Amino acid sequence: MYVFYAPEYDGGILWNDPAIGINWQIPEAAIQLSEKDTQHPLLKDISHFDYASFSGENVYK
């Protein structure tokens, strides 16, 4: 199996984005992030994401 890394497609969403509302059940002081992961945008700030159509509901019920 080959695994390729394409940095131009690398991205993410800020881990504690309130629009997603994940309860990580980990004290914030215990969370360790890389410098890169602290720089991810909020979901609403991603230009190619249609935030208006995002309902915030779990579609995988």
Image (cartoon, rainbow, N blue to C red):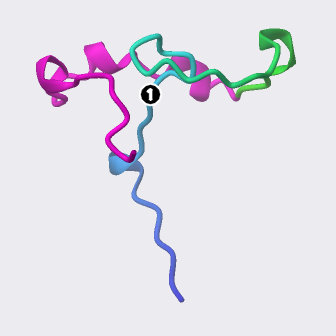
Residue 38 drawn at (x, y percent): 59, 19
Q: Name the residue under label 1.
A: 13
- Residue 42 in which image quadrant: top left
Residue 48 drawn at (x, y percent): 16, 30
Query: In which quadrant is the N terminus drawn?
Result: bottom right
Callout 1 environment at 10 Å: few (<14), some (14 to 19), or many (20+)?
A: some
Relative to residue 52, is residue 35 drawn left or right?
right
Label 1 element class: loop
Instruction: Give 11 or 51, whichever is nearer the viewer.
Output: 51
Residues rendered magenta in the picture: 34-61
Q: Does the segment drawn in magenta span residue 7?
A: no
Prevailing secondary structure class for the magenta stretch in the rendered image: loop
Relative to residue 25, is residue 40 drawn left or right?
left
Q: Does the segment drawn in magenta span residue 45?
A: yes
Residue 6 drawn at (x, y percent): 39, 58
Q: Residue furthest front?
A: 61
Instruction: Give 4 or 46, whichever is nearer the viewer.
Output: 46
Relative to residue 34, is residue 52 drawn left or right?
left
Q: Which residue is rendered at x = 32% and y = 22% of the image?
A: 56
